[in-house]
Every structure is written in C-alpha cells, then in structure tokens.
C-alpha cells in the first residue's frame, strides 16, 4: 500500500505533523515534492523502456538519484521543523513519545520533530480568575449562579455568597499532566472549601464582621488542598464579593440590621455619657478623699498639739498649783477681755462700780463713719444706738466682774 492510497490516512514521512509548529507552506511543499517524485519516477521508467533494436530494457540510475534527493530534502525539512520559539511569560513542555521530558524557558529551542517529540506551551505568568456564585457575561455584567451561591451556615441559615479567586500557574508540568482540567479542579476545590468555612460560622458573623476571616480561612484551605493534589497552581488572592441573605428574607433581615444599628447607637451614646461623667465623678471622689485626708492630718496634729500642751501644763501645775492656776486664769481673762467692752469695779467694800469707756474703739468707729462715702441717713440711724448697746454691755460686764470680786472676797 502506498502512502497516498485510501486507508493510509496520508501518513507520509514528510507531511505527517499534526500541530502548527512547522512552516505555514509545508503542505504545499510536500505536495510539490510528491509531484516531483512522480515525474522523476516516470522519467526513469521511460529511459528503461528505450534501447537498440533488441528491445531489451536498460536499468537507469535517474530514479534512484531522484529518490535520494527527495529523501534528503524531506529529512532536512523534517529536522528544521523541530525549531520553535517560546514567548515571554510562557513555558514549553517537551514530551517524547508522549512522556514528559523537559520544560523550556522563553526563547528559541529545538526538539526532535514529530512523531518523536512534541511541544505544548503554557502561559505561566498570566493572572487567571475564577468565580463562585456568579458568572461574568460581559464587561461589568454578571449573572448569579444560585447552585453555587446558596450555602448553609452553622445555625442552619442560608446565605448567598459570591467569591472571586485569582491564581496563576506555578508548575506547568503538574498543571498539564497531573489533571485533565486543572482549572475546573481548582473551582471544585474552592467551592468545597468555601462551603466548609461558611458551615463553621453562624449567619450573623458571616454577614457582618466575619468577611475577612472567611476569605482568609478559605484561601488557607484551598492552598492546603492544591498542594496535596500537586495541581501546579498558586492562589494569589481570595476575595468575598458579596454575602447577603436570600431575596425571600431580605426585608426581614433589613429590619434586624436596623434594630441592631439602633442598639449600637444607644450603646455608643451611653458609652459617651459614661466617658463624660465618670472622669468628673472620679475627680470629685479624689478631691473629697484628699480633703478628708487633709482634715484627718490636721485634726491629728491639733490633738497631738493639745495633748502635748496639756501634758506640759500638767507638769507645771504639779510643781506650783496656785501659780499655775492664777496664770491660766489671767491668760483666759486676757483672751476674753480683748474682744469685749470693759468695766472697772472698785475692790473696796461697798464701793460703787463706775463705767470704763473704751475710747480707742469709740474713736476708731467715729473715724470710719467720717471716711464712709455713704450719704444716706439710714447708716447714721443704725450707728446711733451703738453707744447705748456698748453701755449695756459694759454694765453687764461690770455686774459680772462685781459678782466675781464678791465671790473672791467671800472665799
């Protein structure tokens, strides 16, 4: 069977490449080589049939040479088809008879042509993206995927979660050869990890303060699983796009949120009032405490001073009781008479008391009245009875002094 016969599948040694790594005009060149081969073969047969009258066929060498030339050209083209270029950011994966052998970096390279070796290229630096709970249908447009978005929380409530993951290829060989569809595997792993994390927390935590924690736990779990699977991918970011309750209970949830906000507002107001009142109360308490401590120290010092003075007086009194008693009496009377009017009484028997006028005080009072700028009569009217009242005080003092003198004489 020839290479171009029906059933052979056109499997000739020069035109059997199945990928697009060869030159663009390779098929045309192979076709021309086939036509050239047919012409040379036909020409060789014509030379072999001609001869001198005997009619004996001659064996010509033109066909063999033509075949050799064609084979050489085909081999050259076949070897040249092994050159390939890896673009920047891509990696080339070389397989020999279907088995992975090497990874090539960006730049020109050569490999044994097909069917011995093949090269497939993978973009290793491209930032890829997958979504859970929604699908992108255009620029700025998305549609919800409820089969992925609806998840059950720990307190048996349902939430609608939308999550986005960015990743890139970290190991091209593992990415291509370990799984038939590594991207879909990562999507399944992400959805499974997210459902597990959501199921560990209650609805209130997930919807309010727990978004960042849910994203971090999900990313950690995804990385652990893909490392164990040797998926050849690296997760860059995991971001919660939206978490909300289902539409059927959205209004009730809004009421709950409003009540929670009112509660927090009242708590903040109470906290502000506490912060304003508590420092004042603490300052007042500290002031009262310090005042009490000062009064305590003053009272103790006064009591100790009185005790010391009384002890000294007692010791002096024990030495000379009469003299000490007289001295104390005189000191007491001096203190009493220094601020009251005085009446001098004769110590003779049957003597009449006489008035002692406090001239110094009377002069001082008159001087103050003259210097006063008050021109009304009311102050003068109020000051007039001062002398009679002073006289009454003097008479009372004189009477008391007379009584004391009589009591002394009796003793």
Image (cartoon, grey):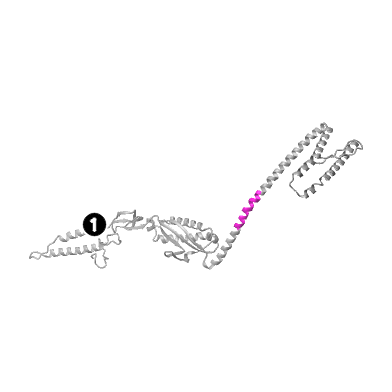
User: Does 184 sit left or right of 12 as displayed?
Assistant: right
Residue 411 seen by the camera = no
| Image-quadrant location for residue 27 | bottom left
Q: Is residue 349 above or below residue 272?
A: above
| Image mark count | 1
Task: Identify which residue, 92 or 60, lies in the foreground.
Answer: 92
Q: Quadrant of the C terminus?
A: top right
Report the span colored magenta.
267-283
Q: Residue at x 77, y 41 (%)?
A: 364
On the image, the x and y values in percent for residue 342 come to 83, 40
Instruction: Determine the secondary structure under disc 1.
Output: helix
Q: Nearer the viewer, residue 353 or 333?
A: 353
Residue at 47% over, 58% down: 239
For residue 269, say whether it is visible.
yes
Disc 1 target residue: 76
Where residue 366 appears, as percent x and y from the top left, is: 78, 43
Left or right position of 108 against 250: left
Q: Kindly identify the residue that appears in the image at 63 percent across and 50 percent down.
A: 279
The residue located at (68%, 46%) in the rendering is: 289
Residue 22, percent from left and from top: 28, 59
Q: Quadrant of the N terminus?
A: bottom left
Q: Which residue extends farthest left?
A: 53
List x then y, in percent, for residue 205: 54, 59
């Amino acid at each position: 069977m020839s290479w171009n016969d029906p059933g052979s599948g056109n499997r000739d040694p020069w035109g059997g490449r199945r990928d697009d790594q060869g030159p663009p005009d390779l098929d045309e060149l192979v076709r021309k080589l086939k036509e050239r081969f047919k012409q040379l073969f036909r020409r060789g047969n014509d030379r072999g049939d001609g001869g001198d009258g005997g009619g004996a066929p001659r064996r010509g060498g033109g066909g063999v040479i033509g075949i050799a030339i064609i084979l050489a050209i085909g081999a050259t083209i076949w070897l040249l088809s092994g050159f390939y270029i890896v673009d920047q950011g891509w990696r080339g994966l070389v397989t020999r008879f279907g088995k992975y052998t090497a990874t090539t970096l960006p730049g020109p390279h050569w490999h044994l042509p097909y069917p011995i070796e093949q090269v497939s290229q993978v973009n290793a630096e491209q930032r890829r993206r997958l979504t859970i709970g929604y699908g992108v249908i255009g620029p700025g447009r998305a549609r919800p995927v409820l089969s992925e978005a609806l998840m059950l929380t720990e307190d048996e409530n349902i939430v609608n979660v939308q999550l986005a993951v960015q990743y890139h290829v970290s190991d091209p060989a593992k990415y291509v050869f370990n799984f038939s569809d590594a991207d879909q595997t990562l999507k399944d792993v992400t959805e499974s990890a997210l459902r597990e994390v959501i199921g560990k927390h209650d609805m209130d935590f997930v919807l309010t303060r727990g978004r960042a924690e849910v994203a971090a736990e999900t990313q950690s779990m995804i990385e652990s699983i893909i490392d164990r699977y040797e998926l050849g991918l690296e997760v860059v970011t995991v971001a919660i796009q939206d978490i909300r309750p289902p539409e059927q209970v959205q209004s009730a949830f809004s009421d709950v949120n409003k009540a929670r906000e009112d509660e927090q507002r009242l708590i903040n107001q109470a906290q502000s009032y506490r912060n304003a009142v508590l420092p004042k109360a603490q300052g007042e308490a500290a002031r009262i405490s310090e005042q009490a401590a000062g009064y305590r120290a003053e009272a103790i010092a006064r009591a100790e001073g009185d005790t010391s003075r009384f002890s000294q007086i007692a010791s002096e009194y024990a030495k000379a009781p009469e003299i000490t008693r007289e001295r104390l009496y005189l000191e007491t009377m001096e203190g009493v008479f220094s601020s009251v009017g005085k009446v001098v009484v004769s110590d003779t028997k049957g003597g009449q008391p006489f008035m002692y006028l406090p001239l110094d005080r009377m002069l001082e009072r008159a001087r103050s009245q003259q210097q006063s700028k008050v021109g009304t009569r009311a102050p003068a009217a109020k000051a007039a009875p001062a002398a009679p009242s002073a006289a009454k005080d003097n008479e009372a003092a004189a009477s008391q002094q007379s009584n004391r003198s009589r009591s002394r004489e009796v003793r």
